[in-house]
Image (cartoon, helix red, strand yellow):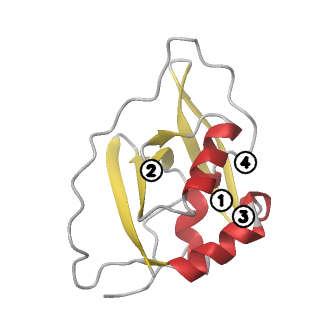
Amino acid sequence: MRVALPLGIVLLVGVGCGSAPPPAPAHAEPEPVAAAPLAPVPEGASVIQRAMLDEVLEAGLGRFLQRIGTEPDLRDGRFVGFRVVELRDEALFAGLDLAPGDTIVQVNGQGIERPEHAFTVWTGLRVASELTIVVLRGEERRELRFPIVD
């Protein structure tokens, strides 16, 4: 198994940097994403080492947010996610299929529209066994999955 992702994979919990999106209508909920069953880690798959993840979590969400630039992605006046504008630390994001222009929609099954959503995902990573990120690249929806291993 390949451990190729530096902690850049954690970036997706912190996409709340940049300007805040306008308040969503009370009826607007993030679209549910069907969870695929967990499968064994295939040979060559990237994983996140728990010890490395813990170091990033201990440094704090604010420090992490300094490494990525985002802006709200609004379509037809509706918040979709956070568009990646800039990856400021290339080494941190090496091995991650994420590029400027991609829109981060969900992390670990949760929308990330508000700062409290990002914080919930961030703290949940302390006990998570996997990091799942839903990204839009253009109109193509992608799901990135990374096991968290000891």
- State yes or no: discs 4 and 1 in contact (Cβ < 8 Å): no
Q: Secondary structure at mark 2?
A: loop
Q: Disc 4 designates what residue?
A: 17
Q: Which amino acid type corresponds to the residue marked 1 in the rendered image?
A: Glu
Q: Quadrant of the N terminus?
A: bottom left
What is the C-alpha distance between the residues marked 3 and 2? 18 Å
- Mark 1 or mark 2, which is nearer the start of the sequence? 1
Q: Which amino acid type corresponds to the residue marked 3 in the rendered image?
A: Phe
- Mark 2 or mark 4, which is nearer the start of the sequence? 4
- State yes or no: discs 3 and 2 in contact (Cβ < 8 Å): no
Instruction: Indicate the position of residue 55 as horizontal and vertical percent values.
Output: 67, 77
Q: Which amino acid type corresponds to the residue marked 2 in the rendered image?
A: Asn
Towards the viewer: 144 or 38? 38
What is the C-alpha distance between the residues marked 3 and 1? 13 Å
Q: Disc 3 designates what residue?
A: 64
Q: Nearer the viewer, mark 3 or mark 2?
A: 2
**How many residues crowd around disc 1 within 10 Å: few (fewer than 14), some, or many (20 or more)?**
some
Q: Nearer the viewer, mark 4 or mark 1?
A: 4
**How many residues crowd around disc 3 within 10 Å: few (fewer than 14), some, or many (20 or more)?**
many
Q: Disc 2 designates what residue?
A: 108
- Mark 3 or mark 4, which is nearer the start of the sequence? 4
Q: Which amino acid type corresponds to the residue marked 4 in the rendered image?
A: Cys
Residue at image position (57%, 50%) is 121
